[in-house]
Amino acid sequence: MEKIVDAQNVKKVYGKAQGKKTEALRQLSFTVEKGEFIGIMGPSGSGKSTLLNLLATLDKPTDGTITIDGNDVTKLKGNQIADFRSQEIGFIFQEFNLLENLTASENIAVPLSLQGVKPKEIKKRVNQIAQRLSIDAILEKYPAEISGGQKQRVAAARALVTQPAILLGDEPTGALDSQSSRDLLDTMKELNQNDQISILLVTHDPFSASYCKRILFIQDGVIQQEVKRNDQSRESFYKQILTILGTLEQ
Ligand SMILES: Nc1ncnc2c1ncn2[C@@H]1O[C@H](COP(=O)(O)OP(=O)(O)OP(=O)(O)O)[C@@H](O)[C@H]1O
């Protein structure tokens, strides 16, 4: 199996040398295989956002290594980091972060324009991913003219149009109603199953997490527990997640 992410002994300490220090992550190790759909859960303050920032190459670990698609991202410097991020990492957030004065299609095109891809190729790739996410009909609309669920699909298309090694999600259903959440999660499941897109989802929400194939539970900066869905139904996985969360948050 090909590893998309290989995090080894990752440690993150916040704070100045002399001042108060917070050890947000301690000796955290895990891998993500190509085509996995993995969830990260844990109580508030357990280190989830810290981990996501490190995986997104927005911050560096204090110690340890993080390899993404064969590249040790802890060794990247300056411009290499931004280039790597724009090519290899797709990101969807709770807030959709769309540019309000650009149409859906222009929003999706932004990462490709930044990479200097030619307009004809951009058009082709935007149309392809829009079809995949069933948003072809709204491509010429502005964010203010579409629903929350559609906005998140546009954001997902923007994240995937560069064909990144991994799609990172930070509570992507957090601002959606339950039907739009379900639709987005179904689409993510489909992209994972049919297109082998590797997805890592950080979430508080057991319903979203129940779509994952494997979940890492973090507590106090370490992986406390790991569960696999295997062949159980999503409903039964959901119940298992609730039980574990109950024990963790005591
Ligand atoms: N920039 C920072 N400077 C100092 N401490 C920080 C910083 N960011 C996070 N921390 C601390 O690191 C620990 C882990 O925080 P983190 O935000 O990663 O947790 P989380 O699991 O994402 O929490 P939540 O679910 O509430 O978003 C916490 O103790 C937090 O206070």
Image (cartoon, rainbow, N blue to C red):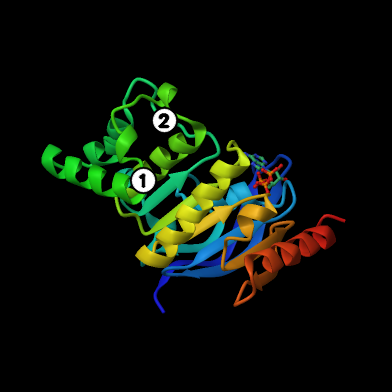
- Residue identified by numbered label 2: 98
Report the disc number at residue 4.
none
Observer-nearest of 82 and 164? 164
The foreground one among 46 and 146 is: 146
Crowd tier of the residue under label 2, counting other residues whose Cα lies within 10 Å: few below 14, some 14–19, many 20 or above: many
Report how many numbered discs are placed on residues in the image.
2
Relative vertical location of residue 60 with respect to residue 113 in this rendering, above or below: below
Element on which disc 2 rests:
loop
Look at label 2 and name its amino acid.
Answer: Leu
Secondary structure found at label 1: loop
How far across and down, in percent of the image, does residue 228 sit? 63, 73
Quarter-of-image position of residue 106: top left
Residue visible at 39% across and 38% down in the picture: 154
Percent x, y of residue 143: 41, 26
Confirm whether residue 172 shows in the render: no
Horizontal placement of 131 versus 42: left or right?
Answer: left
* In this picture, residue 222 sits left or right of residue 81: right
Relative to 90, is 68 above or below?
A: below
Image quarter of the C terminus:
bottom right
Q: Is residue 85 left or right of residue 148?
A: left
Ligand 1: which quarter?
A: top right
**What quarter of the picture does the N terminus occupy?**
bottom left
Residue drawn where x is 66% and y is 71% of the image: 227
- Residue found farthest to the right: 250
Q: Amino acid at mark 1?
A: Ser
Mark 2–mark 1 CB contact (< 8 Å): no
Residue highlighted by disc 1 = 134
Residue neighbourhood size for the residue with mark 1, other residues' Cα within 10 Å, grouped as few (<14), some (14–19), many (≥20): some
